[in-house]
Image (cartoon, grey):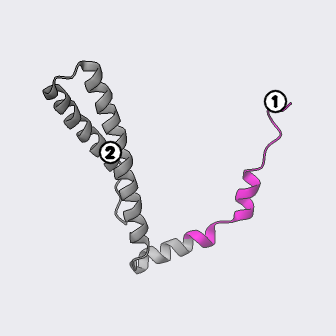
Amino acid sequence: MVRFRGLHIVAGIAAMGLAAALGIIMGLNNTAVFTSSCVVFVAVSLWVQSRVAKFHTRLQGLPQPDGAALERTVERTTERPAERAAEQLPSGEGNAA
């Protein structure tokens, strides 16, 4: 499967730089340039992250090579939910009132 780790950060930083350049060209003061650049960074990085997530969900419906299907089946059979649930039980430590 294709991985896009960090793509939303890179896109946000690129958009932030572009917004800063446009803010300086428009004659905004430093505070306004910084604030608008941060807003653009958050908006673009969240948008790209949502688009990548939609792309991944579309990829999950496509047929996969035999090795990947076999690997996923082995992972499912080796997991033991009862053991994981026992590990997640509270140990009785802490300062509960």
Contact, mark 2 vs mark 1 (Cβ under 8 Å): no
Position of the C terminus by quadrant: top right
In this picture, residue 60 sits left or right of residue 74: left
In the rendered image, which quarter is residue 51 located in? bottom left
Q: Residues within 10 Å of mark 1 (few under 14, many from 20)?
A: few
In this picture, residue 80 sits left or right of residue 25: right
Q: Which residue is mark 1?
A: 95
Residue 93, image x, y percentages: 81, 36
Q: Please, what secondary structure does the residue beneath circle 2 have?
A: helix
Most distant residue in the left direction: 25
Q: Which residue is mark 2?
A: 44
Q: Which amino acid, mark 1? A: Asn
Q: Please, what secondary structure does the residue beneath circle 1 have?
A: loop
Position of the N terminus by quadrant: bottom left
Name above or below for residue 21 compared with residue 57.
above
Residue 25, image x, y percentages: 13, 28
Query: CA gap, disc 2 to disc 1?
Result: 43 Å
Residue 39, image x, y percentages: 34, 35
Most distant residue in the right direction: 97
The structure residue drawn at horizontal position 59% and vertical position 71%, both measured from the top left corner, is 76
The structure residue drawn at horizontal position 78% and vertical position 45%, both measured from the top left corner, is 90
In the rendered image, which quarter is residue 3 located in? bottom left
The structure residue drawn at horizontal position 26% and vertical position 36%, both measured from the top left corner, is 16
Foreground: disc 2 or disc 1: 2
- First in sequence, mark 2 or 1: give its number: 2
The question of residue 65 being in magenta is answered with: no
Name above or below for residue 62 compared with residue 17.
below
In this picture, residue 6 sits left or right of residue 30: right
Q: Which residues are magenta?
A: 75-97
Q: Which amino acid, mark 2? A: Val
Residue 41, image x, y percentages: 32, 38
The structure residue drawn at horizontal position 21% and vertical position 30%, both measured from the top left corner, is 20
